[in-house]
Amino acid sequence: MTRRDKLTPEGFHAEIEELFSELWHVPRFAGRRRGFRPEVDSYRTDDPPQLTVVVELPGIDVRSLTIALSERTLVVAGERSRDRSGGRVYQQMEIDYGPFQRQVLLGEDVDPQEATARYEHGMLTITLPLAAKPVLGGRFAIVVERV
């Protein structure tokens, strides 16, 4: 008699649910792309009047980051690299690595000359003061301060 023969209908149902749960965590079935997609929060404050974008980037080398602002679009791009030290045989691999790019549409005009970015404890915080009038054309880079 096999283990399956001893299952009750409830146990069999639980085993099927577990199987499907594991199946959807496999990247090719979960619809996940190669690389990783950091999570982003953005919000507006009135005092001071500014937009703030927070990007979750643990394990990033700040030198790989590019932050660009063009009209009402903020683009954050970079890469999280896996350490390629030899002799490793992974038992489990869940952390996503690779290149990424996130685009954040801004709801208001901002002043690119006054924009700042800080990377601290794996979080990138970009502060974008609101502009009194629209800034005409161009693409602006924002330098990241590492704390």
Image (cartoon, rainbow, N blue to C red):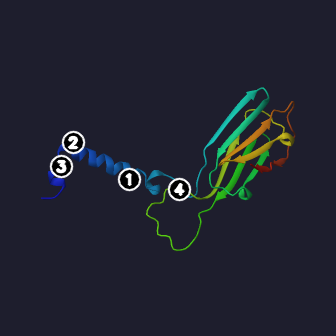
SS at mark 2 in the image: helix
Q: Amino acid at mark 2?
A: Glu
Q: Residues within 10 Å of mark 3 (few under 14, many from 20)?
A: few
Calculate the distance from the C-alpha at mark 2 to the C-alpha at mark 1. 20 Å
Residue 7 is labelled as 3
Residue 51 x/y as whole percent: 74, 34
The residue to which callout 1 is attached is 23
Is residue 31 left or right of 69 when viewed as pictured? left
**Dot 1 and dot 3 residues touching (CB under 8 Å):** no
Q: Position of residue 123 (x, y in %)?
A: 66, 46
Residues at badges 4 and 1 in contact (C-beta under 8 Å)?
no
Q: Earlier in the sequence, mark 4 or mark 3?
A: 3
Dot 4 surroundings within 10 Å: few (below 14), some, or many (20 or more)? few
Regarding mark 1 in the picture, which secondary structure is present there?
helix
Q: Earlier in the sequence, mark 2 or mark 1?
A: 2
Q: Is residue 74 above or below residue 61?
A: above
Residue under label 4, please give it.
95
**121 and 105: which is toward the camera:** 121
Check the image and name the residue furthest to the left: 1
Depth check, mark 4 against mark 1: the one in front is 4
Horizontal relation, residue 146 to residue 35: left or right: right
Rendered view: 62 above or below 90: above
Q: Quadrant of residue 54?
A: top right
**Which three-letter amino acid code belongs to the residue tagged 3?**
Leu
Circle number at residue 10 = 2
| Of the image marks 1 and 3, the number of the one nearer the N terminus | 3
